[in-house]
Image (tube, rainbow, N blue to C red):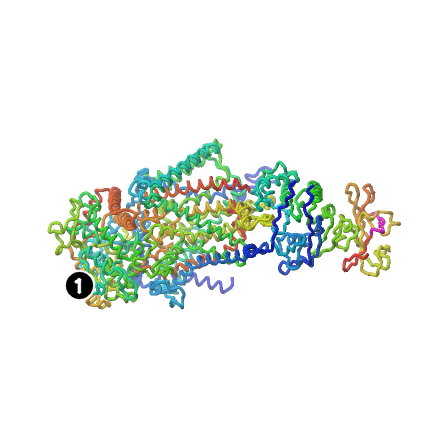
Amino acid sequence: MPNAGADVRPGGTPAGILQRESWGEWLDRHSRTFFIAPAVVLILIFAIFPTFYSIVFALSRVRFTGEGLKFRLVWFQNFAKQFLGNDQVHFLGKVGAMSWVGTLFFAAVIVAMVWWLYRCTRVTSWVGMIGRLISAAMAIFVAWIIGGTLLSGNPIGTLLTTLFYVVVGCALQFVIGTGLAFLCSQPISGKNFFRVIFFIPLMITPLGVGYAMKMVADITKGPFQPLFGAATVDAWVWSADPWAARIVMMICDSWQWIPFIFITMLAALENVPRDHVEAAQVDGASGIQIFKEIVWPQIVPVAVTVLLIRMIEAFKIVDLPNIMTGGGPGSSTESMTLHSMYIWRANDVGTSAAVAYLLLLLTVVTCASFFNYVVLGQLRRARV
Amino acid sequence: MSIYKKSLCALSAAVALGAFSGVSMAGEFDGVTVNILTRPGYVIAGRLAERGKEFEAATGGKIVVTEVPFAEIFPKIQNDWSTGTNAIDVGVFAAGWGVELDSAGLLEDLTPYVEKDTKLDLNDIAPYFRDFGQKIGGKTKLLMVDGDFQMVYYRKDVLEKAGLQPPKTWDQYLEVASKIHGQDMNGDGSGDYGSCIFKKRNAQSYFAIQTVAASYVQTHGTAEGFHFDAKTMKPIVNNEAWKKAFEVYKETGKYGPPEELNMDIGDTRGLFKAGRCGLLIEWGDPGTLQLDPDAAKVKGLIYAVGAVGSTEVLDRATGKLVPVTKESAPYAVDGINYAPFAAFGGWAGAINAKIDQKKKDAAYAFLSYMNQAAQSNVDVTIGATGYNPYRLSQLASTDLWVKAGMPKELAENYLGAINGALNNPNMASDMKIPGAQKYTGVILDTELARYLAGEITVDEALKNIEAGWEEVTEDFGRDSQIAAQALALGTPGN
Amino acid sequence: MPAGSPKVPVKFDKVQKYFGPVKVLEQFDLDVAPGEFLVLLGASGSGKTTALRILSGLETATAGRVVIGERDVTNILPKYRDVSMVFQSYALYPHKTVAENIGFPLKVRRVAKAEMDSAIREAAAQVQLGELLDRYPRELSGGQRQRVALARAIIRRPSVFLMDEPLSNLDAKLRGYMRAELKHMQQAFGITTIYVTHDQIEAMTLAHRVAILDKGVLQQLATPAEIYNDPANLFVAQFIGSPPMNIVRGSLEGRHFLTNGARIDSPAGGQMDKAILGVRPEDCAVVAPEDGVLKGVIYTTELIGDHTLVTVEIGDDKLTVKAPKDINGNQGDTVGVALRREHLYVFDATTGQRIR
Amino acid sequence: MSKATFRLDKADRSLMQRLFEPPAVGKMSPVASLLAYALLAAWSLVVLFPIYWVVITSFKDAAAVNQGPFYVPFLDFEPTLDAWRAQFTSDPYCDVPSIARQIGLLAYNSFAFIVSPVVTLQPMEPQICKIFLAFTNSIVVSIAATGICVAVGAMAAYALARIQYQPKIGNVAIFVGLIVLIIIATSYAGVPWWLASSIALALFFFLARTLGRRFVLSLGNGDILFWIISQRILPPIVVVIPIYIMFQEVRLLDTHLALILVYAVANLPIVVWLMRDFFVSLPIELEESAQLDGASRFRIFWEVVLPLTRPGLAATTLLTLILNWNEYLFAVFLAYAKVQTMPIMVAAKNAGEKGVLWWEMSAVIVIMIIPVILMAILLTRFISKGVLMGAVKG
């Protein structure tokens, strides 16, 4: 029987059941916010706020004076400088008169984009269309630069060098990584040994990898010196030839990132249900047919996700070019992050932020397009 | 907790507390810590740390030397001092960079300290460094620890074997380099290189190109300068003189190591110490570096050429190259215009204006300690330190150098070359105006690297440099730059 | 009816299988007649699935031979054994439509498109999947998925059907229906089929003959009737039949079985002090205490529907008796239990062997 | 009724089949296994050779490095320890007594760090052995950053997995507007930053309370998750400069706190992404039963959920620890003297005047790599159990 005569504690209801709420209970009642608050606040302060702040830098010329920073708003001059000013050759490459190969390629890309947009009009809402328009515009712009520089024999700028690292690099890394994963998923002994070894490069400090690769790739004193013949006076050297330097850079970057694809694809391969493979074997499928018909379709969703993650990381390449060749012969191996970092070193914060923003734009559009048209496509089709 | 654990805690706490009290010989700067920021490696930082220990023993002031890569010294100091973070008390960097920091009012004026300082013996410092190196706007803002300018070096034995004279002009430099290129210079059977110049991007390669260009462009003495037109601040780059300099610079590549575009000063020094280089463009260091143990193959064989000039000079009005005459090149010597380039201006120490007085005194005392003849005369002779002579007492007699292990004949050549350059009225000064680091370190260096790599032609490179320099001038304000340039190139002694 | 597909015998000849130190199959000998529907029955871990997998080639026998038709297939890949298998999990390819799933065995054999399509439609018709051909497995019910697996198995008319508990994931009603379908289809095709299950009803209803396995040892190979009425040993006796056969411990003297003070005349003679008497609940009856062979107290009564199960406690044994649904015994009454003499079974307590 | 039986009849195994076909299921054909081992061996050579080269270079001296490639110690060249010895002798303060003193100091600092929330550590003794300072800095920073990152990330991941949030798009728009206002005020109008941000914060809560009611459109958990994970797409170079300026304003440059916070945020997206998949895969009944027993949400998280995802948690913690240990870009901008981490130490070794001291640099790299390789071996043990599988499929 509730003791009717209970004294009424201050703030308590007459029934004397609801005592003052201990701070623990209050905390629990608001736990909804307390759980997510720290993460959101940290990201707001250290990621979102700086991103906006960086816009201010990109739009103005900044000078260091006795009493701190002086901002002079110049709107889009820093950005325009990259496209029109004397930096254009550094950023886009020498976009000279387009050779016929270049024009052909450029025209083909335009046609493909227009046809793709036309085909999509029936499929998606207007938001989707805007997304597609942006992607198409970016693709045409890049095609124009490729046509103007690469296919017309002119040197390319940091934009295309970064794209080269991302596109060609990720493709090479994906093929080798998946191949290794397939090998390791076969019934061979010592699998764990290889798994551990292959994982190590991913974990080594990129800086350490940079110097290790610089030592290994050094023609005069490095291990491959005999291959290049006794350092004859006019021996060919990879660090003097722009394309060779880029390829060596990409190979060293792959050395570090192939393990990432190897580990994730191995996990995917090992998660294909045993029954399916056995059923196919009983049905008379050969090894190749099993992989092509049964295993590959089931790991494609994971594969595209892994590729997307790798692309996001690939855009940020900075340590290797900085250490191995300091931007390479001229600026041929310079990635956009490095481009921005070198400008920062000269305390030209405005242009540096502008280049960083262009990199952000390039990354977002490329990754978003890849995500929407490839990853979601695969996930929808292979509704597992 | 077991007894053992308790005692361990007590011990470590005691040790920690002991560290705090910093018991050291009571001295003038007891408890004061001076943070110095400079480039890494034993070259500058190492010597500072060792002298720092001696300084601490004498005065109790603690010297902490922090090393950051070369390209980050200037931005870090400028940010640290301009925003008042004051993590750095003293910056040891290129004398030329001091101007930009001074224009933002960040450097402490050392004139009062110098007057009170008895042990410094200011006049012993060579005039160029005393007035150009240490003074900004007429006031002493820096104390030199090293006197730098670039010279051409040659392998005496190799040239004599080939019956060649040391080059006097850049064309002769190319000729000599081409003749000896491919010969075996260190007896290891493989062919070696006619000339080794560090051309890697972002690694001080922009100084070497200025050494070549100075003799083509500067004809009427140091005050004329060879970067800008003093009155309009218009860059005098886009002309035949700089074009010739660029072409000569690229031509040296034919007789250099194939990896030259990716070699920084460390790599080229590795090469010439292994005896693989016939000709060099370098600071004062090869003189002493050849005495190092791992340079046994070239000990006493690397001689210096006072300066290398040119028979054609720039006519500023037309922008064309004209042969050397009395009017076009008053300071020319038998038809050759020399303009030794004080590249980098030498390493100097500057003090942060916004730190407390006690720290300033301790910092000044240390810099003066480093600069005094007693210490610097020893430091400049040690090859490893990378300090080059800047005091008259060091340049007058050769016995100081012979004592350090240099053969007499080499010492005479080395000091002769340095004195010749120092006393040359047409000496070219390094750029000493705000933005110097961006004018040369970023714009000139990037365009040069891209030209050497064949990405752009020489005309495009010069056009880009001109546009880039104009933009920087706009940034800082044309008039303030004109004033700064006038101050920087003011005739010595004012 | 698709006559003419050759009926093929299957033979296990002293097959042994070790997984590391663990012995999973022990001297396993089995002869399956051509066209026969043989069920491998046993609890989980009895080695029945391993035997099936060894026959299919997914596992290799540690020792012994496996013969299909007249070919020794012991060390040959599954695809050359011309067997097809229905997995317990159906193992349908999620990214392929029903038609693609069914047609996969033909696709890998590079059969012409037209011929493959007609074979697919025909197989689908046989399992009433006609209109689901372009659906994905995730869009089908359990029963439909099971039938797709079945269609995939029959499409290429293999010499041997292997089925690994195909009905265990279905609900009870559907399981009954599918059992009838399976039996009918097997009779129709007359393809030798080896069916693995732990469900004795399936075994009893489907099999021509049942092979009962326990811990890798073949306990008995006989027709369903024989294993029900003539169990070879105690394990088989108790394994078959639900509720399971009652067992009473006691001793055997001459023709009489002595237990709990009662003397029951047993069908088998012999002298054994430790023996077990087995009787199925339907062979007992609840009678008045005085004229029952055994006397005991009613422990519980369970009304099943068409009959009632009465559990009578006699000494420390409990007997389950199948009684008519309207029996009115309450817990605690003392009753007698009458046994039908011709349905008693005597086993040697130590070896479990049946004494005839 | 088609009577064709589709049978792959098989003659005895031809040579080709004996070579190229696996003898049985679960085994590989001789040629395939040979090829597999060859490729795997080749690739492990490619992986191990650079590491091997760095390790042996750390035992070479100047002559051994410059006179051309020597491959095998004791055969090609005499290994010497002076590169390693130089690490501790080249710096006058690296002798044993001073290191002992510094360890005592570090113990005191970490004790102070934990006890008092004021986190700017007591400055280490000014002259300190560089290599030792860098190593301890790296340890202190990466462990603290990993701690914060995993704690905050796990809580956020659990929240996103279990609690439904509907932030109004209107409120988000207001917040973004206010951020832009703060920035314009501080940089162009010279308003002190703390004044601008406090006004903005007050304004936001006021508007959210009043205007917020009327907004209808709202975001879901999926959008929040995508927003957090998409931080990974942000190239660090974009935010580094503003963060540098922000830390300067609050005088936190060159302090451990600065690096710890920045590293924690940099790796937050990965932690949230990995941990969310572990939490989603947990059966919800466990938590519901704990709720019925009266446990608060924190207790459920602490005592029910975390213990269950221990392998996932361990894998994520290790991965974050390694990523923090390797970070370079932020350290270059934010660390000057007192907080130099190992990667900075290696970079500083590069610009030697007397030619790059490859042997000393290799020694520093080896010192830096050893802890990472140990952690990597530990991590593969988790990954091999498919721990990270959930995340990738997600």
Q: Nearer the viewer, residue A143 or D141?
A: A143
Which residue is the extreme one toward the left? B326
Q: Secondary structure at mark 1?
A: helix
What kind of residue is marked 1? Ala
Query: Which image quadrant: the N terminus of chain C?
Result: top right
Pinpoint residue C153: horizontal percent, then vertical percent. Answer: 64, 45
B306 on left or right of B54: left
Pinpoint residue D367: horizontal percent, then vertical percent. Answer: 41, 60
Identify the residue at horizontal 51%, vertical 61% (top origin): B1
The residue that label 1 is drawn on is B396
Q: Residues within 10 Å of mark 1 (few under 14, many from 20)?
A: few
Looking at the image, can residue D345 be seen?
Answer: no
C178 on left or right of B124: right
Tell me where residue B60 sits by quadrant.
Answer: bottom left
What is the chain letter for disc 1? B
Tell me where residue B301 sits by quadrant.
Answer: bottom left
Pinpoint residue C316: horizontal percent, then vertical percent. Answer: 79, 54
Which residues, given as a range, are shown in magenta?
C333-343
C155 on left or right of A95: right
